[in-house]
Image (cartoon, rainbow, N blue to C red):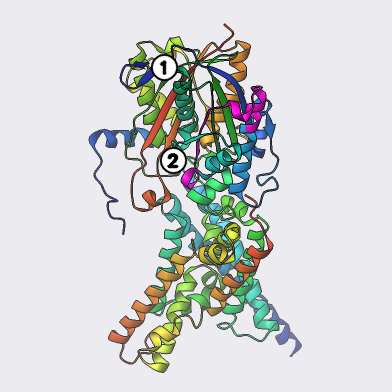
Amino acid sequence: MLKGNQSWVFGNRPVITSTATIVGPWEGKGPLAADFDKIHDDLLDGQVSWEKAERAIMEEAASLVIEKAGLTKEQVQFYIGGDLMDQIISSSFAARTLAIPYIGVFGACSTSMESLALASMIVNSGSAEHVLSGTCSHNSSVEKQFRYPTEYGSQKPATAQFTVTGAGAAIVSKKGKGPIVTSATMGRVIDMGIKDPFNMGAAMAPAAVDTIQAHFRDLQISPSHYDLILTGDLAKVGYQIAKDLFAKHNFPIVQTRYNDCGKMIFDTDKQPVQAGGSGCACSAVVTYGHIMKQLQKGELRRVLVVATGALMSPISYQQGETIPCIAHAVSIESGVL
Amino acid sequence: MKAKANKKLTAVQEEYKVLAKKREPRRPVVMNCLRAFIVGGIICTIGQGIQEIFIHWFDFDKISAGSPTVAVLILISVILTSLGLYDKIAQWGGAGAAVPVTGFANAMASAAIEHRSEGLVLGVSAKMFKLAGSVIVFGTVAAFIIGILHLIFNPKMGGGF
Amino acid sequence: MHRTCRLDRKRGTLIMYIQYLWAFVIGGGICIIGQLCFDVFKLTPAHTMTLLVVTGAVIDGLGWYDPFISFAGAGASVPITSFGNALVHGALEELENKGWIGIITGIFKVTSAGISAAIIFSFFAALLFRPKG
């Protein structure tokens, strides 16, 4: 049901019946390593290219999440997915293997919550029993496409972020046991004139703040409603900027805990990740791995996950364009309490 | 040149730029320059050593020894790139690894290696010049223009040396 | 006679050490200019290299790069600026020998070693090695 300008409230309480997370070597050495289903030690993992490796982990996560839900592929009505590759080939080719009716979406690094929101909306409206929502990213394939060849010696500044290698998937179902998706707010494209692709945090922070404010405005609640508000991948620099913006707009974020997946997934002091993590998989694996566990155990009651994405391409940057960004928010409640 | 690169920012955007700049960690310029000096200096010293070898053992003179020296440095750089070591040197050394001719070789080798998955013709060969192409093109065009200028202003065509 | 030879050898070694020192200092110095382009002027590596190559070309156009190499040795011939120098050298040499058509026929004469080496070795590297990420 529509609430306010840009939000949905899911009265029929769609359930996240299972999640699966696969990560790469760096994430496997990070602070959240124990919360992921599988860690790959090798970026290529026996494949012949980065792109094939990315596709393989997406397929692996999708198959695993269906298995964990106790379902077969035929019982899942739709697969909503996207990623950072040109023409979202990782998701499309995974969809070819899964043979589930496929809805491809592009939200850059906000894809995880974009697809989760759409999946929940479809299930809530009675248009499906089970929907698979998933996304992936791979450090090397992203470097190759957006920045430089992986063996090229370029010096990264402290504002740069490290793309997470991983895949996260969830099954949203009409009924079952698990955390419940209660609402979602779809974001608007926000562009504050930032041009530096090595400072995504600064580009994306305004979009996150805009969507978060919209969410509370639409639902007529206050931040204290949630135990935790999580942004997707603002990392160290963007996180600070977001806090500054909240203060500037007198938004009482201090009523609750505020953290960021890009900061959580890596140890930014010990690992060579500059400002922190980014990529579609960043918000996906932290949410579907770490946060899900806390929700299932009842350690968290209500969480708002706000995935953030930068909607640029290498050509738009070369043509002197600024970086427009977007953020999508989904609220998840523990099914236990 | 970029077409709309200087699109005017609105007042809100300008204000935001200032806010964002405050949170941007300062680049350690002095430290980076020191590292660049060290790495660049070492590479050039190695180059000097190689040049001396060509002069004393292979009978080249100071001018003609430049070419084989550059070729050897390029080989070393390609090997280090192939072993996955050059990018680590460059993250520390910055311009010290990018500015010498070894950086040029690294740009070409890394692009060639990266695009092997797209095949030899459309991948390796076509995309090898992704990064180094601008250097070659601008160098060539600059040399052409300078040649023309010499032709116009220096009818003896011997000016310079 | 013996003593003079020894002194000459010592002098030669000293000159060689000084040459190495200058190579280090000048080469490092040009790299500092590149680092300032990265950090202060926020130029990309591609823009910086291009700027340096054109600078090298202009300096040779003015006739100042050869003396620079005599003095700084590899400190001037190893940085990418010397690439610009070599391109202009080739053009101007052929201009003197063959007339105006020499500008075009001569550009790659001197740099042939560098470009050929880079292409050939990169090609074989791509055949033999995979990227490590």
Crowd class of label 2 (few under 14; some 14 to 19; many from 20; radius 10 Å): many
Q: Quadrant of residue A43?
A: top right
Residue at mark 1 shares a chain with residue at mark 2: yes
Q: x, y percentage for residue B78?
A: 63, 64
Q: x, y percentage for residue C19?
A: 59, 73
Read off the chain for label 2.
A
* Residue A187 seen anywhere in this rendered image of the structure: yes
Say if B37 sits above or below C114 in the image.
above
Q: x, y percentage for residue C106?
A: 44, 85
- The extreme front residue here reads A74
Marks 1 and 2: CB-CB under 8 Å? no
Q: Quadrant of residue C126?
A: bottom right
Say if A55 sits above or below C36 in the image.
above
- Compare residues C132 and C24 and report the one nearer the observer: C132
Q: Which residue is mark 1?
A: A253
Read off the chain for label 1.
A
Q: Quadrant of the N terminus of chain B?
A: bottom left
Magenta region: which residues? A63-88
Q: Residue at x 44, y 87 (%)?
A: C93
Task: Label 1: state its secondary structure.
Answer: helix
Say if C78 sits above or below A283 in the image.
below
Magenta residue check for C98: no
Q: Is residue C76 left or right of residue B11?
A: right
Q: Quadrant of the C terminus of chain B?
A: bottom left
Say if A307 sits above or below B47 in the image.
above
Q: Which residue is mark 2?
A: A199
Q: Residue at x 62, y 70 (%)?
A: C121
Quote the CA–CA distance across marks 1 and 2: 24 Å
The amino acid marked with disc number 2 is: Asn
The amino acid marked with disc number 1 is: Ile
* Residue B22 seen anywhere in this rendered image of the structure: no
